[in-house]
Image: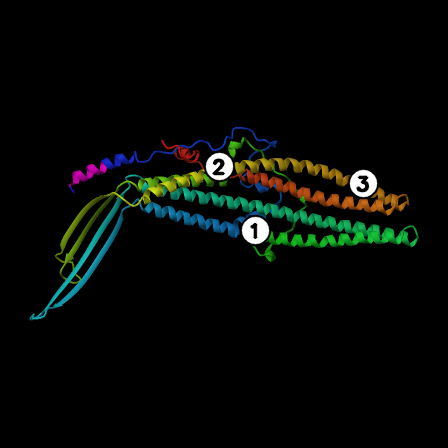
């Protein structure tokens, strides 16, 4: 091919490449301009180290250990590394390929009727260069898809970290709650045993019946039986916490803290649309959409001609293991290939890719709706649990006062044991419920922080790239 003709053909094809792909524009998936449906607490978005807002030094230590040693975090890191290598592999297709070859040979020929043997020897070395001109952006689309997949894996890594840190916090709060409930159960047992001694004393003097003694003994036995399941739950929670931290249960040391001493971080929420850049799962869904768009570009480009350039040079000689006085060969080739018929295989690949874009779009929309729902639920729970804790504290205080009054009346003979037993059950139940509500309030705070992304912020991207992820498929221009 004449050099000028080849350059001219390449220039024309390069100009056509600019028109081969038209950017896809998508509409916003959900209208997020309205305000939240629940009451919004005062405060700022969660900080990246949001767990320090609970002011529990032991929790800080546990989360730092989990981020360093958890198998889930290390698995996510290796997935990121694998995706980085995949991007490098895809990017290699944009560069020329270079190959080196060398050969030596010796031949002996004996012909019937010939007076001798013919021997021939040869040596050769060659260098070949191949390059596919990315006319229609097929190769660059593959690179964009790999980069979008890498972004998605990185966002998954952030989701793993957020899930891990919130899981450690909830497990630690549950551990403290069980410690508190176990202590309450032991105090209730001591209270029941103290009252048992009073009933037995009254029975010896004839002021109480054998039935009264039996009923109070039943209360004591019930309180002793209540200790075992709490102790079992405490051990299991400790083992679960060790797994999250990445240690054996025997290696985990816990000093514990009083659950009522923990603080609640002040977390606020802006308009719903702000969560678009605050949640790694939403960023992952956007990355999947960009990867699907890149697959469509690559599939469409595969329908168009391909241009291959190749160059080679070789040295050959009839001497074994020597290239002295060689024969030199240089070649330059350009080939243009177009698939004419494949039974619709390439066209169906385009259709499949376009369906994949629609699936990714709906997944993104679903993830966004789920995110809004989780924030709304968390806001309601935070408000409800705060009110419920105040109400239950008042119930506990009143039940304690009723128990004290009933004991005094029973000692004075002004009331029967039934009043004391009822007051005991009410007080024991009120104490245990208050401990569980405190746990629920802490868990609700963690859930709100997690729903808001745990202090994560999406990295800024170029404006041209941002247009692709705020879009709805199917509106090609």
Figure quadrant of residue 41: top right
Separation of residues labelled 2 and 1 (CA atoms): 31 Å
Quarter residue 440 falls in: top right
Distance, label 1 to label 3, CA atoms, is 42 Å
Q: Is residue 3 magenta?
A: yes
Which one is in front in this view, the residue at disc 2 or the one at disc 1?
2
Q: Residue at x 81, y 41 (%)?
A: 402
Which dot marks residue 244? 1
Query: Which residue is at the far right?
Result: 205
Residue under the image location 32 percent in, 43 percent down: 346
In this picture, which residue range is highlighted in magenta? 2-11
Q: Residues within 10 Å of mark 1 (few under 14, many from 20)?
A: many
Q: Please state if 471 lies on the left or on the right of 47 as rendered.
A: left
Element marked by disc 3: helix
Q: Circles 2 and 3: CB distance less than 8 Å?
A: no
Going from N to C along the chain, the mark reached first, 2 or 3, is 2
Which residue lies under the disc numbered 2?
Answer: 365
Q: Residues within 10 Å of mark 2 (few under 14, many from 20)?
A: some
Q: Secondary structure at mark 1?
A: helix
In the rendered image, residue 77, in percent from the top left (x then y), is placed at 46, 49
Residue 401 numbered tag? 3
Residues 360 and 52: in front is 360
Q: Main secondary structure of the magenta part?
A: helix
The residue at 77%/44% (across/down) is 427
Pinpoint residue 234: horizontal percent, then vertical percent.
Answer: 66, 52
Q: Which mark is residue 164?
A: none
């Amino acid at each position: 091919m004449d050099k000028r003709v080849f350059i001219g053909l390449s220039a024309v094809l390069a100009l056509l490449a600019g028109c081969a792909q038209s950017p896809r524009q998508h509409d916003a998936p959900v209208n997020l301009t309205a305000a939240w449906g629940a009451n919004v607490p005062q405060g700022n978005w969660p900080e990246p180290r949001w767990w320090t807002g609970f002011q529990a030094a032991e929790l800080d230590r546990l989360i730092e250990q989990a981020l360093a040693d958890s198998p889930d975090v290390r698995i996510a890191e290796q997935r990121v590394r694998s995706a980085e290598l995949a991007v490098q592999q895809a990017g290699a297709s944009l560069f020329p390929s270079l190959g080196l070859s060398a050969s030596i040979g010796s031949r002996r020929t004996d012909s019937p009727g010939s007076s001798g043997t013919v021997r021939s020897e040869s040596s050769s070395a060659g260098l070949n260069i191949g390059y596919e001109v990315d006319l229609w952006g097929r190769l660059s689309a593959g690179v964009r898809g790999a980069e979008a997949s890498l972004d998605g894996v990185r966002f998954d890594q952030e989701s793993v970290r957020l899930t891990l840190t919130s899981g450690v916090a909830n497990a630690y709060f549950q551990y403290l709650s069980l410690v508190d409930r176990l202590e309450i159960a032991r105090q209730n047992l001591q209270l029941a045993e103290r009252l048992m001694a009073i009933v037995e004393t009254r029975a010896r003097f004839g002021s109480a019946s054998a039935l009264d003694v039996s009923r109070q003994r039943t209360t004591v036995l019930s309180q002793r039986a209540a200790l075992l399941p709490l102790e079992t739950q405490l051990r299991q929670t400790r083992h679960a916490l060790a797994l999250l931290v990445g240690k054996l249960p025997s290696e985990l040391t816990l000093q514990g803290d009083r659950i009522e001493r923990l603080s609640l971080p002040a977390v606020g929420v802006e308009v719903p649309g702000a969560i678009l850049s605050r949640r790694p799962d939403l960023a992952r869904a956007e990355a999947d959409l960009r990867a699907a768009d890149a697959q469509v570009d690559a599939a469409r480009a595969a329908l168009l001609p391909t241009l291959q350039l190749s160059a080679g040079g070789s040295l050959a000689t009839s001497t074994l293991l020597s290239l002295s006085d060689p024969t030199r060969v240089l070649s330059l080739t350009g080939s243009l290939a177009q698939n004419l018929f494949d039974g619709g295989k390439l066209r169906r690949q385009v259709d499949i890719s376009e369906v994949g874009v629609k699936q990714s779009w709906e997944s993104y929309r679903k993830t966004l709706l789920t995110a809004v729902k989780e924030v709304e639920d968390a806001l309601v729970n935070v408000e409800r649990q705060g009110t419920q804790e105040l109400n239950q504290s008042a119930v506990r205080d009143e039940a304690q006062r009723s128990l004290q009054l009933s004991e005094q009346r029973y000692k004075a003979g002004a009331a029967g044991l039934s009043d004391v037993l009822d007051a005991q059950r009410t007080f024991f139940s009120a104490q245990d419920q208050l401990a569980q509500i405190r746990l629920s309030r802490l868990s609700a705070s963690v859930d709100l922080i997690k729903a808001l992304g745990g202090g994560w912020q999406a990295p800024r991207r170029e404006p041209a790239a941002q247009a692709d992820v705020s879009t709805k498929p199917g509106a090609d221009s």
